[in-house]
Image (cartoon, rainbow, N blue to C red):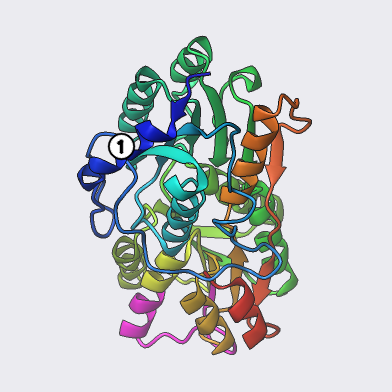
């Protein structure tokens, strides 16, 4: 493997000011891959049962003899959502200089630009490539190039459509299970009719695929009506526009199934503008995903009905896998799933918000 010693890392620190910047909203960070050194996103609190890693504990001293492990991190836009902000910060804290890593990062929501950045990291000779792909397709060539170059690939957050032989393992949420859990909760509400506005995330993303497939299958099987099924690309403003257009059309609906909290927030803004009640005892059921703290507070206040957890604190698991590989151990599992659950407005407590809100 291509080792960088501590002295090389000191040199890397001198150019840290060239690190990528993060755009607002859904804008993409188009800067080339660079050493991580930007100011991390705002502090987030880790769930009690799935704690964020202690950057000075399990992730410490990954290599012997003073050697540094070089890491390339491919991720989505840090400002995409509260989930992504927490995920980005968690990885930056875990794979830090203090913990013995020399880390390059690239943040963007366009798959082809992620692939381009990954190719550059391979050419730079990183030891490990950690990838959260914007799209599940289009990664075969870069993964093969990484393998040919001796770069070990670990997937996180999302699994891609490629041969399992091309990556070591994946640390992921079970997106299909998230969708199935949410749909099972919705069915238990026993509505006389189900007329659903379905707000989808960025098409092709694993979270979108898993959460959409569960609802689409249930609608076909149970005769539920999908009043509209459109992508709002994780964005609150786009979600608000979609819901407003349904309201203006005069179509009837009683459920909004939003595939992340930000889109649920935008949907609620449209309902409030039209004086349509929502949440517990309201006319419209509101469902979101990710468990942002502010979203769980909306749940507890009765303004929303359901929020599905998506655990962003994957850094520690990835660091554990790297340690095993470094020690010569063969990884026994290809997929490592994060523990997650769903929350009901009628049952959620302040302790849940404190423990699981991100």
Left or right? Give the position of 75 relative to 16. Answer: right
Q: Nearer the viewer, residue 21 or 258?
A: 21
Look at the numbered disc 1 and give the secondary structure of its residue.
Answer: helix
Q: Which residue is outermost to the top?
A: 148
Residue occupying image coordinates x 56% and y 56%: 56
Q: Which residues are magenta?
A: 268-286
Q: Position of residue 67 (x, y in %)?
A: 51, 31
- Residue 263 lies in the magenta-colored region: no
Question: Does 221 appear above or below 344?
Answer: above
In this view of the protein, which residue sits in the foreground, 152 or 7?
7
Residue 259 position (above or below residue 60): below
Residue 329 spot, x, y in % from top left = 75, 27
| Residue 134 seen from this side | no
Q: Residues within 10 Å of mark 1 (few under 14, many from 20)?
A: some
Q: Is residue 278 magenta?
A: yes
Task: Name the residue rendered at 27%, 59% in the picture.
Answer: 25
**Going 59% across and 70% down the picture, which residue do you hit?**
307
Tell me what residue is drawn at x 41 percent, y 66 percent. Answer: 262
Is 210 above or below relative to 48?
Answer: above
Image x and y of residue 4, in percent: 43, 27
Residue 21 in the image, given as x and y percentages of width and height: 23, 50
């Amino acid at each position: 493997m291509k080792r960088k010693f501590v002295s090389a890392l000191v040199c890397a620190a001198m150019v840290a000011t060239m690190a990528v910047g993060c755009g607002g909203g859904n804008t993409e960070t188009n800067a080339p891959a660079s050493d991580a050194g930007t100011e991390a996103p705002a502090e987030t609190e880790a769930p009690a049962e799935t704690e964020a890693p202690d950057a000075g504990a399990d992730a410490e001293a990954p290599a012997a003899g003073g050697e540094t492990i070089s890491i390339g991190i491919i991720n989505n836009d840090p400002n995409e959502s509260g989930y992504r902000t927490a995920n980005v910060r968690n990885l930056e804290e875990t794979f830090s200089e203090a913990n013995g890593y020399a880390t390059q990062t690239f943040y963007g929501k366009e798959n082809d630009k992620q692939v381009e950045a990954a190719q550059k990291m391979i050419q730079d000779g990183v030891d490990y490539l950690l990838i959260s792909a914007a799209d599940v397709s289009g990664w075969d060539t870069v993964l093969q190039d990484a393998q040919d170059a001796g770069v070990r690939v670990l997937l996180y957050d999302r699994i891609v459509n490629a041969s399992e032989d091309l990556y070591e393992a994946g640390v992921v949420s079970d997106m299909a299970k998230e969708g199935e859990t949410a749909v099972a909760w919705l069915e238990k509400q026993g509505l006389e009719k189900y007329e659903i506005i379905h707000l989808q995330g960025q098409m092709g993303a694993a979270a979108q695929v898993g959460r959409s497939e569960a609802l689409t299958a249930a609608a076909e099987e149970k005769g539920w009506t999908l009043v509209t099924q459109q992508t709002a690309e994780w964005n609150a403003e786009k979600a608000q526009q979609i819901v407003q257009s349904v309201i203006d059309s005069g179509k009837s609906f009683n459920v909004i199934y939003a595939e992340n909290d930000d889109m649920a927030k935008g949907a609620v803004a449209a309902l409030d503008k039209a004086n349509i009640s929502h949440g517990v005892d309201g006319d419209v059921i509101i469902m979101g995903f990710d468990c942002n703290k502010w979203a769980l507070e909306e749940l507890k206040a009765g303004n929303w009905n359901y929020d599905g957890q998506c655990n962003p604190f994957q850094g520690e698991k990835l660091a554990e896998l790297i340690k095993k590989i470094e020690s010569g151990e063969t990884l026994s599992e290809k997929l490592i799933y994060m523990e997650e659950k769903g929350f009901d407005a009628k049952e959620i407590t302040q302790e849940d918000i404190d423990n699981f809100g991100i």
